[in-house]
Image (tube, grey):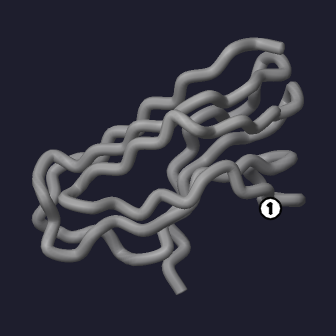
């Protein structure tokens, strides 16, 4: 099992509403990226993980403007890889659009 976790927000400053996610690799990887954007009570232990969106790339990209997820104040938001990222990729970028509730 892959256990790579990348924090996006270590602790949300206020309640927020996630509207869209854009994820990109620097190139089209041989093995596409699969993973999940989740939130949890805290990064230590990842208690009560909740799925925001599954990130499964095609040609190294993922885009969804149809996300409608509320996240309470004080939660950690993170990317959890399902597979090991392709070693040939140089970077992964994740942009999350949100509004504060």
The local secondary structure at tag 1 comes to: loop
Residue 73 vs 5, above or below: the answer is above
Q: Nearer the viewer, residue 12 or 33?
A: 33
- In which quadrant is the N terminus drawn? bottom right
Lateral position of residue 2 relative to residue 84, left or right? right
Name the spot of residue 55 as percent of width and height, x first: 47, 58
- Residue name at image x 49 percent, y 65 percent: 35
Name the spot of residue 65 as percent of width and height, x first: 51, 34
Residue furthest to the front in view is 66
Residue 82 vs 62, above or below: the answer is below
Quadrant of the rendered image containing residue 99: top right
- Residue name at image x 34 percent, y 65 percent: 33
Residue 57 vs 40, above or below: the answer is below
Q: Nearer the viewer, residue 72 or 62?
A: 62
Residue furthest to the top in view is 100
Q: Nearer the viewer, residue 88 or 54?
A: 54
Name the spot of residue 69 as percent of width and height, x first: 75, 38
Lateral position of residue 78 relative to residue 84, left or right? right
Lateral position of residue 95 relative to residue 92, left or right? right
Name the spot of residue 31 as percent of width and height, x first: 22, 75
- Residue name at image x 75 percent, y 31 percent: 11
Q: Which residue is mark 1?
A: 45
- In which quadrant is the C terminus drawn? top right
């Amino acid at each position: 099992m892959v256990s790579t976790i990348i924090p996006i927000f270590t602790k949300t400053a206020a309640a927020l509403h996630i509207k869209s996610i854009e994820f990109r690799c620097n190139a089209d990887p041989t093995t596409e990226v699969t993973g999940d954007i989740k939130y949890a009570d805290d990064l230590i232990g990842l208690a009560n993980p909740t799925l925001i969106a599954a990130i499964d790339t095609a040609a190294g990209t993922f885009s969804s403007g149809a996300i409608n997820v509320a996240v309470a104040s004080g939660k950690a938001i993170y990317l959890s890889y399902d597979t090991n990222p392709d070693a040939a990729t140089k970077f992964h970028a994740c942009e999350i659009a949100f509004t504060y509730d």
